[in-house]
Image: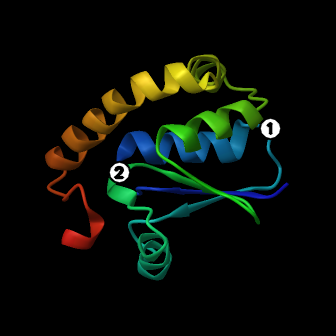
Amino acid sequence: MALTLVYDGGCPFCSHFAQRSELMGGLPNLVIRDGRSDHALRAELRHKGFNLSNGAVLMDEDHIWHGSEAISILCQQLSPSDPLLRLLNGVFSDSGRSNRLYPGLLMARKIALGLRGLPVDPDQA
């Protein structure tokens, strides 16, 4: 199954997670796309009701997952060779735990973007 992870390329945490997932996640068909720089993709997702400012998006041919659900589904699929990804996999592969912890990730993203002078919503740039 080919998966596409759409992340916020302006967020250093999001970028780091996406790149590590692609390189060391053990998913050969994982595609990562920077939603902040891909305006057409972001507009398409927004039209379908998925706002990148509210979290990452994971897609396959039939489904779209958003926010904590996207990260949980992705972590359930990973077979990481990287210690940090193994830790994140253990934490976020449980959907209930991912749901509870995801707001903290969004807050860290908001702070990191603020420090970089970037808006939380890429469409507000």
Q: Position of residue 124 (x, y in %)?
A: 19, 70
> Is the image coloured rainbow, by chain, by secondary structure, or in one colour?
rainbow
Measured Cα–Cα span from mark 2 to mark 1:
26 Å
Q: Mark 2 falls on what kind of element?
A: helix
Residue drawn where x is 23% and y is 55% of the image: 120
Question: Which of pointers 2 and 1 indicates the residue nearer the eye?
Answer: 2
Q: Mark 1 falls on what kind of element?
A: loop
Residue drawn where x is 15% and y is 47% of the image: 114
For residue 125, say whether it is visible.
no
Residue drawn where x is 14% and y is 55% of the image: 117
Q: Is 23 rendered above or below residue 99?
A: below
Q: Position of residue 84 (x, y in %)?
A: 58, 22
Residue at the spot of label 2: 54
Q: Position of residue 25 (x, y in %)?
A: 72, 37
Q: Amino acid at mark 1?
A: Gly
Labels 2 and 1: the sequence-earlier one = 1
Crowd band around label 1 with a 10 angstrom C-alpha radius: few (<14), some (14–19), many (20+): some
